[in-house]
Image (spheres, rainbow, N blue to C red):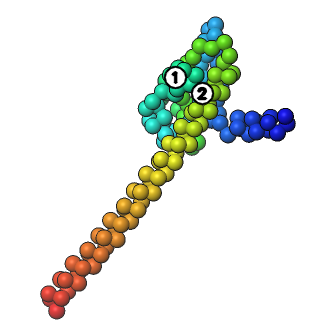
Amino acid sequence: CEEEEEVKEDQENSLVQYQIHEFGPRRFRAFFAVPRFLLGRLMEHPLVCRGSMFYLCHDDNDDAPHGRGGSSTTHMTIVTVDFLSPYPQEMVLALAERLTRRIERTTEEHEEHQRIQQKASSRYQRRASHDETSVTSSFASIFL
């Protein structure tokens, strides 16, 4: 039993940071801290959880350093999800798990894209350097 609790605690520690606020009877808003550079990709599609779709919302004002929002030094921002539930803690935990998986998957895709671009850029630079050397040597042979 203790091992299961430790595993559960480790899983919860690896999730995105979140807060939950009640704003009506059984009406809640969850706030999730996410990497700013993934914001567009994360919001492209709703989170599917327990047979429902949950749309992530972002308010540009939440990026201000006044509180919930991330500052430009942290590279984090806040997205929100509104939902109805008699069990809000369970729901927000399930949403956090799905959002964490999406962030991990999107980060891996982003890193792979960066590696591909970097390889292409270095190939282009080598080719341009080689072409420049060829042109220079061709001109040199003409004038010699």
Q: Quadrant of the C terminus?
A: bottom left
Reading the image, the residue beneath label 2 is: 95
At a point 30% along the width and 75% down the height, the residue shown is: 130
Q: Position of residue 99 (x, y in %)?
A: 57, 33
Q: Which residue is mark 1?
A: 54
Which label number is shown at residue 119? none
Q: Determine the secondary structure under disc 1.
A: strand
Give the CA separation, mark 2 to mark 1. 9 Å
Residue 33 screen position, x and y as percent = 59, 33
The answer to whether mark 2 and mark 1 are in CB contact below 8 A is yes
Query: In the image, is 118 to the left or to the right of 20?
Result: left
Q: How many marks?
A: 2
Looking at the rendered structure, the kind of residue marked 1 is Phe
Q: Position of residue 132 (x, y in %)?
A: 26, 75
Q: Which is nearer the N-term, disc 2 or disc 1? A: 1
Can you tell which quarter of the image residue 78 is in? top right
User: Height in image: 141 above or below 69?
Assistant: below
